[in-house]
Image (cartoon, rainbow, N blue to C red):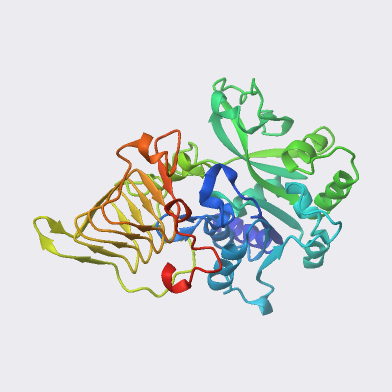
Amino acid sequence: MPKSQHERYVSVLTKQTMALVLAGGRGSRLKQLTDWRAKPSVHFGGKFRIIDFPLSNCINSGIRRIAVLTQYKADSLIKHMVNGWGFLRGEFGEFIDIIPAQQRISEDWYLGTADAVYQNIDIIRNRAPEYIVILAGDHVYKMDYGQMIAYHVDNQADLTIGCLEVSLEEAKGFGVMHVENDHMVKAFVEKPDNPPHIPGREDVALASMGIYVFNASFLYEQLIKDAATPGSTRDFGSDIIPSIIEKYRVYAYPFLNIQTGGQAYWRDVGTIDSYWQANMELVSVDPEMNLYDQTWPIWTYQAQNAPAKFVFDDDNRRGTAVDSMVSGGVVISGSTVRRSLVFSDVRVNSYGLVEDSVILPKVNIGRNSVIKKAILDKGCRIPEGTVIGEDLQKDAERFYVSPGGVVLVTPEMLGQEIHKADWSEEQLS
C-alpha cells in the first residue's frame, strides 16, 4: 500500500477509536510522593505530568475521543486536565472526558483494571466507538497508537496487546506472552518464574505494556462475562486475557524503534529510584527521550511564568545551572545547579549547591544549603544551611531514602503541613 493510502487508512481507523486512560491508581511504590496525588498526576521532566505522555500520544496519533478514568486523590489531576486539556472541539465529535469513580453499577469502587472499564460501560457504549484502546496513565513513552490499531485490524484480531522486548530476568516482573512466529498469542502468564522466550531468541521475552486494542463489541462481551464470574479479580492481565486466548484471536504488538529496530523508549516510573533515574536521563547530552522533537510534541498545561533568571556573578556567589533543565519562574540566586531538573517557580538562594536532583514546583531552598541526589516535593521550604544527600543514615531519620540512595523530601517531613486546612495558599506560594 502506498504511504499516502496507508496514512489515510490509519486516520480512518483512529477516528473510529476511543481511548480509555486508566488514571485512578495511587502508585504506592512512589512512597510519600503520592500521598496527595494520584501517580499519573506526579510531575515529570521539568514541566510535565506523567499523564501528559499517553494523552499526547493519543492526540499525535489522531485519537481525539478520550476518557480519563480517575479514582484516588484525583483533584490535582482533574485541575491539570481542565487547565491544559480542554482544547478539543465537541462540535467535531472530539472530547477528553474526565470520568471519576461513581459506583454506577454497584456500591463498589473500582476493583481492578477491567472493573474500572466495566463500571463505565454505558458511557463508552453511548460514544459508539468501533475500536477501544486501553492505556495506563502512568508510563513515560512516545508511541503511535494508529500503527498498532492498523496492525490489529490487519490481523483480524479480537485483542492486540502492546509488548516490550525484555530480558528473561526482567520478564519475571511482567505479564508475559508465549507467541508463535506471527506473534499470535498462545499463552499469557503473570510474573512467571520461567518466562517463555520469543521464538528464535532464547534470551528475550515479550512483556505486556498494559496497552490493549479491543474490538468494542468484543470488549463489552468479555467485561460482562468477567463481571459474572465468581472469584475474578476484575483485572485484564489476571483474568480477561488468560480467559480468551484459546478461543479468540489475540496478537502481540512489539513496540520497536522504527529507525533501529530495537526496543523503543518506555519507562515505568513506579518507584522512587526509577522516577529519579528517568528524570536524570533527560539532562544527558543526547537523551533517548527527546522532549525537543517537534514532530511528536508532548502537550501540557503551562502557567504564564516569567523566564528563568540567574543572578550574581561573584566568585563565591554565582548563579549557574549546568547540564540541567530549568523551567519558567525559577530564580537561581548565587547558587550552583548541576545535573538537575528544576520545575517552575523554584527559588535557589545564595551560596548553595544542587546536584543530581529533581526539584518540583514552588520549592524554596534556603541559603548555604547542599542538596544532592534528592527529590524535593512541591512546596518544600528548605531551611538555611540544610544538607541533604551527604549522610544517608542521618537523612533516613527524617526523610525517605530509597534502596538506590535517593532522598525523598516532602513538606510534611519538614513539619510543613501545607495540605492542612490551616495552611494558607500564600504560604505555599
Q: Position of residue 105 (x, y in %)?
A: 86, 58
Q: In this image, 149 relative to 294: left or right?
A: right
Q: Position of residue 16 (x, y in %)?
A: 71, 62
Q: Nearer the viewer, residue 414 or 51?
A: 414
Number of residue marks: 0
In the image, taking residue 126 as reference, residue 37 lies left or right, namely left
Q: Is residue 215 visible?
A: no
Quarter where residue 73 is shown: bottom right
- For the point 74% across and 42% down, the residue is 236
Q: Is residue 220 left or right of residue 331?
A: right
Which residue in the rendered view is the most extreme toward the bottom?
A: 91
Q: Relative to the observer, which residue lies in front, 28 or 343?
A: 28
Residue that appears at 32% across and 37% down: 391
- Which residue is the extreme one toward the left? 315
* Quadrant location of the C terminus in the rendered image: bottom left
Q: Residue at (65%, 44%) from the top-left corner?
A: 210
Residue nearest the observer in this picture, 21 or 397: 397
* Residue 218 percent across, percent down from the top left: 83, 49
Pinpoint residue 409: horizontal percent, then vertical percent: 42, 49
| Quadrant of res 159 | top right
Q: Identify which residue, 329 or 267, lies in the foreground.
A: 329
User: Is there any visible trace of residue 188 in the rendered image?
Assistant: yes
Residue at the (43%, 74%) spot, across then down: 426
